[in-house]
Image: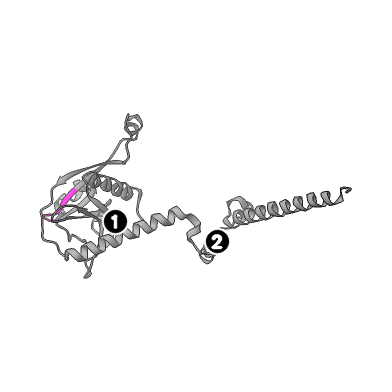
Amino acid sequence: MKTPLTLDLEKTLYAYWEDLGAVAVEEVTMPADRGIVDTLVMQPGDPLTWRCFELKVTKSDFHSSAKLSFIGDYNYFVLPLTLYQQVADEIPAGIGVMTYQAFDPAAIKAATVPITVPGQLTISRPPRRQALQVPQTALLERFIASLNREVQKAKQVDKGLSHFSDEQLLAEIKRRSDQYRVYDPESNLYDRVMGGVEGTAVSTLQAEVDALAEELALLRQPS
């Protein structure tokens, strides 16, 4: 589960490189047990330029045993500025650093132009170019697959509940049954769903009764 700060870093990182004409995607699985790149950026050109980013928001996160997938032409840590100041001496040579600083909420509120990102990124340490650590064809295949995954996720959101089968919806309702509130039915998913179903059924039946009553009234009129 990503923290709000991680999501802020991610959103700002996307915007930074997209403004430069690059394409970014998150969580790209690498071949040959090379781990997962937090964010992979592809810059158009001949040849393509690949940039890998590892996002860390705490010191324990920075020191975790998770594999660092620095397999691109250029590789970076993305860190809050305060964290960078704590771990700067531990960052390997050749690895770049982009530091994050959140915008002041009052400044955002007072801004005269729309601000679409929560903060700003600065290249505090430039990376050194290295040879790609995986074949470019494999990298491109995984990049496209990850983009497709994000498209499918967006389509699911757009379709809403219609995307899910009856079995999936029922399983979710059952999963939430342990949270059932006897004295607060409006808070229960089951009661809200059944209330809507029953309300629709009553409205439909009432419409049918009204139509039959109207037909009966017409039949009883003297010819």
Mark 1 residue element: strand
What separation in Å lies between label 2 and label 1 (alpha carbons)?
Answer: 31 Å
- Of 117 and 85, nearer the camera is 117
Q: Position of residue 87 (x, y in %)?
A: 19, 51
The quarter of the displayed image where residue 152 is located: bottom left
Q: Which mark is residue 26?
A: 1
In the picture as drawn, the residue positioned furthest to the front comes out as 223
State left or right for residue 161 relative to residue 26. Answer: right
- Of 40 and 58, nearer the camera is 40
Check if mark 2's residue and mark 1's residue have beta carbons within 8 Å. Answer: no
Q: Earlier in the sequence, mark 2 or mark 1?
A: 1
Report the colour scheme: one colour
Disc nearest the viewer among 2 and 1: 1
The quarter of the displayed image where residue 133 is located: bottom left
Per the rendered image, the range of residues in magenta is 92-97
Q: Which mark is residue 9?
A: none
Q: Position of residue 84 (x, y in %)?
A: 20, 48
Name the residue that disc number 2 marks: 173
Mark 2 residue element: helix
Q: Residue at x 53, y 67 (%)?
A: 167
Q: Is residue 88 visible?
A: yes
- Of 209 and 191, nearer the camera is 209
Q: Residue at x 44, y 53 (%)?
A: 158
Indicate the amino acid at tag 1. Answer: Glu
